[in-house]
Image (spheres, rainbow, N blue to C red):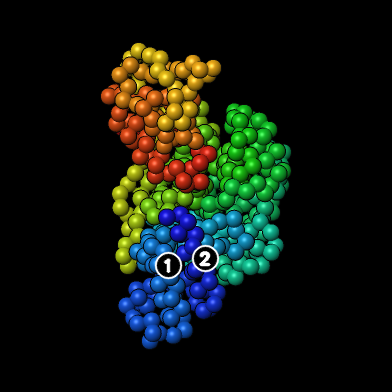
Amino acid sequence: MSNKVELVKQTVTYFCGLSGKTIDDYFEGLDRVTQGNIMEQEGADWLLHLELNTLASMGITVHDIKDNEVKIRAYVQGIVDMDSAVPQILLKEALGYIENTVSSEDCVLWSHNELGDLLKDEAKAHFISAYNSDAVNKLSISAKGVFQFDLFSTELNDIFADDYIATLPDEIRGCIENDKAILLEMACLNEKPIRNDMARIMQTPNVLFNYEDFSAYSKILYYQYLYQVMCLVLEFELKNLYLGVFLPVDFYTTSFSKVFSRVFEFKTGFVNDSDKDFIFVIAKSRGTYLDEVPEEAYNIDKKVFTVDGKIETKQTVNLNAEVSDVLLSDWVKDTSGAYYVDVPKLIIPAEIKRSSGVIVTDKQLEGSLGTMAISSLDELSITTLPYKAGSTSITENNFWRCIANFTFRRLYADNSTYANRVFYAPNTK
């Protein structure tokens, strides 16, 4: 469906650009125009109906379009001057979580992205910042204060910390100095390396984090932001900074998240079932760096779209309950202790491999039903005899694990998003 979604994105963009209509007009008109006669329609309705008929001829239905509304909105709407693709419908959902978790009456609200326009009337003291003057000028918002602030302006340590916060508005600076409640919210940021100065800082061991190694994350923008916010918490020992942030859905499977959890306590959040690219998380600062990674349950709401375009909670899932340390390729193998025997090796599934006329052999468990390739490139290869390196024998003991592995890889084999990822065993508890 991924290629079809890309096609829909282009047709929606074309519709909005040619007709002058909005993305809301597009989704509002889906059912209406298809119920009418295209020969009697004109203008935007005729154009939309024509596009839908064209998509239908390619096997793309209105239902498919609605199922992928989040991705389509994220692509078409795009957030001006922000490294984010979080659609308005999810931003509004995040606003509800913020209101239910943090009392705006007792909190200074500091928005460092597009939630500012939604939150402008929600707090007594609301400030909105952007990293450069152009972005500030484009923030057409009547908030208490719009100001320019570069989160990466300096390395946060005991020498430069006071200078770092000196440029902040008085109320925000006062909250930091006196450890009063602050809600800092940011968008999910994409993975382009934009701040080489921050990358160098993250690659230098930092005593605040007991010299943890952040090198692998130093050139990814949202990790740079999180690192700097964690430095702010630890440098000023903040216990009342709430962080509302969109993050990659696999964030809590990374080693970075273990460091993050020692600085921030997970409070609540959600993931949209129709678009698992993002999770929204609200976390509260601990004021210190814990000696060990805490054992916490990251219970998060899974959201689904209803037929009327609203979002409702489907169920609650535990993000860290699904994390495994066992590689999927190891989990599939039969480890019962059966004996290996020599069997002919294949060149291709139809031919036996020979060298100087002699049949080349490979190892296979005795009594095997066949062989499955479990390397990253050949997950779909199943043969009666060993075919390539990185294979495992299919036996009665691991038969259903092989079926599960094959099914999973069959579903995701052509999805480039997953091509270079490491896969871990499912949680069967």
* Residue positioned most to the left: 396
Residue at image x 36%, y 43%? 299
What residue do we see at 60% from left, 58% from top? 82
| Tag 1 residue | 55
- Disc 2 crowd rating (10 Å Cα; few below 14, some 14-19, many 20+) is some
Residue 87, disc: none
Residue 121 in view, yes or no: yes
Q: Position of residue 396 (x, y in %)?
A: 27, 24
Q: Amino acid at mark 1?
A: Leu
Please name whichever residue, 287 or 394, is drawn nearer the observer in this view of the structure. 394
- Return the x and y of residue 260 as percentages of the image width and height: 52, 38
Number of on-image labels: 2
Q: Nearer the viewer, mark 2 or mark 1?
A: 1
Residue type, numbered disc 2: Gln
Q: From this viewpoint, which residue is outermost toward the front?
A: 357
Residue 62 in the image: x percent, y percent? 37, 67
Cα distance in 3D space between marks 2 and 1: 11 Å
**Callout 1 secondary element:** helix
Residue at mark 2: 10
On screen, residue 400 above or below 336: below
Q: Residue at point 38% right, 14% down?
A: 340
> Foreground: 282 or 377?
377
